Image: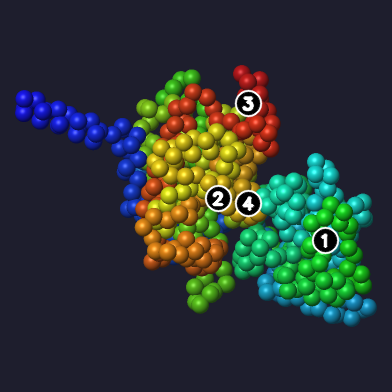
Amino acid sequence: MKKLLSVAIILIISVACMQSPVEEVAKTITKQSLMKPIEVLSSDEFQGRSTGTIGEKKTIDYLVKKLKEYDIKGGMPDGSYTQNVPLIGQKTDQDTRITISKNGNTIHSFDYYSDFMAWPSNLSEEVSVEDSELVYVGFGIQAPEENWDDFKEADVKGKVLVVKNNDPSDDPALFKGDTRLYYGRYDYKYEKAREMGAAGVLIIHTTPSAGYGWSVVANSWSRERFYMRGDKSLKGSNTKFNGWLTKEASKALFASAGLKLEEQLKAAESRDFEPVPLNGLSLNLELSATYRKQEAQNVLGLIEGSSNELKDEHLVYTAHYDHLGITQPVKGDSINNGALDNAAGVSAVLNIARGYKKLQPQLKRSTLFLFVGAEEVGLLGSKYWAQNPTVHPGKVTANINLDGMNVYGKTKDLVLIGYGRNSVSDTIEDLAEENGRKVKPDPHPDRGYFYRSDHFPLAKKGIPAIFPNSGTEYVDKPEGYAETVDSLQNANYHSVNDEINEYWDLSGMVQDVQLFFNAGYRILNAEEMQRWDKGDEFKQMRLKMIEEVSVQK
C-alpha cells in the first residue's frame, strides 16, 4: 500500500511539474536574455542608432547576425533580411531667428532652439518669409463629422498660421473628449496648412498639450530630418515652413497684438471659434537647408507557419531600432543611447523570435519580425513597409508593436494602447487575467499614443494592432515607487539620460514579454484572423484589404 501511495505521489508531482512546450520555451525568456541585446544596442559604440549614421549600420548588422544565429530566414520575398527605405535627409542651418515687426519696427527676435523650431516644409534649400501676416486659427481643424471648422472660410493663403496643439477636449461628446485623435497630431496641423495654402505654420507648445517638454521638441527637430523620397505632397508646396513656438514666445507674440494667450487658447475649445488675425504684426524668417539622399533600412525575419491552409497569413511583431543619435552635449554627454527607447523593445522581439523558432512545427501561421528604422524621424520605416508590404495587409492577422518596455519591476497590471478596439486586445486581456493580472486602457488618452508609434501605419492599412505599455501597480516596491518611475521616464525620454540605471529591474519585462509571447502563440493558432471591433475607425479598411486578397485569388 505504501509503495502504491508513493508511486501515486510521484505521479502527481510529475504531472504538476510538467509544462507544455510553449511554457517551457517562454521560460527561456529571462532577465539575462533580455538585458544582453539592450546592453549592446545602447552602448556608446552604437552612437545612439540615428538614421543615416554608422550607428544605424552597426545596428542593422547586429540584427541580421542575431536572426541568422537563431536560424530565422530573411523576411523579404527573395529571402534577404533588409528592405531599403529611400529617404531624403534635411539639415537646417541653426543660425537663424524669427523677427516680429509692428509699424515697421522689430519688437521681437526669437532664437532658434530656445524659442522656436522651424524647417523648410517644401524641401527648398532657401526659404524667405517677409512681412507675412499672422493669424491664430485655434486648433486648425476641419472635421465635418463633428460639424467643426476652425477656419470659417477665412482666406489664409500666404499667411503664417499660429495653431493650438492637440484637439478639443472640453466637451466629452466631441473628438472623444480627452482622447487625442489624429486631428491633434502635429502631422495633421502641417498637412492642413499645406491644404489651405498658408505660408507657414507655428504650433504653440505647452507641456500639457504636447505630453512632453520643450526639450523634446528642440532635441527632435534640431536634428537631421528625413522624408520619403518622391513624396509629391511636399515638393513645390506653397507652405514654406513648419515649426513650433514656445509658450513664453507665444505669450509675448499675442500680447503684442493686444491679446491674452490663455484666453485665446480657451476660446479655441468652442465650435463657434473664428480665426483671430494678429493685427499689426508681421513675421520675417530666413531659412537655409542642405539635403542628401539616404537609404534607411528595415530588418525582417520570417518563421514560416506549419499549416498549408494558414501559413500565408502572418502575425507581425514590430519594434523600431533607431534613436536620436548624437545631439547637443548635456554635462559632457552627447550620445542619446536609447536604452528604453527602443533597445528594450528590440530585445523583446529578438527573444520572442528565438523562442518561436523552437516551436516552429506548432505554429500554424507565419510570423514576421519587422525591425523598422527611421521611427524617430516620423515613423518612416513602418510607413514605407505599410506602403510596400512584403505581406499583403489582408493576409496579416495582427500586429503587436513593442516600443519601450517595463524595466522597473513586476506589476499587477498592464496598459494597452488601443485597449478594447480589437480581438488582439481581448487575447492579451484573457491571458493577463489567467495570470492574475489586470489590463487597463491608456491612462493618458490626451497624449495620442496610438498615433505615435509603428503600429499606426499598419493600423491605417486595416491590420488589427496593439501597442502595450507598462503597468503602474508595482509589486514589492516601496511606497511612491510608481511616481519615481514616472518622473524618471519623463526626465529620460528623448534625452542623453535614456540609459540603463540603478532603478532597472527586468523582472517586469520578463513578465510582460512572456505574456506577449503566449498571446502571439494563441493568435498564430487561432481558428480565425484577428478583427477590429464594430465601429472602429480602421474596420472599413480591414474589410477592404481582405476583399482585395479574395479578388486576387
Disc assigned to residue 546: 3
> Would you name the residue on which mark 4 appears?
445
Q: Is residue 532 above or below residue 226?
A: above
**1 or 2: mark nearer the eye:** 1
**In the rendered structure, which disc, 1 or 2, sits on the residue that comes first in sequence?**
1
**1 or 3: mark nearer the eye:** 1
478 left or right of 173? Answer: left
Q: CA distance from mark 4 to mark 1?
A: 22 Å
Q: Is residue 433 above or below residue 267?
A: above
Q: CA distance from mark 2 to mark 4?
A: 26 Å
Q: Residues within 10 Å of mark 2 (few under 14, many from 20)?
A: many
Disc 2 on helix, strand or loop?
loop
**2 or 4: mark nearer the eye:** 4
Q: Amino acid at mark 3?
A: Ile
> Would you name the residue on which mark 1 appears?
267
Identified at 6% across, 27% down, the residue is 3
Q: CA distance from mark 2 to mark 3?
A: 27 Å
Task: Name the residue at the front extreme.
Answer: 1
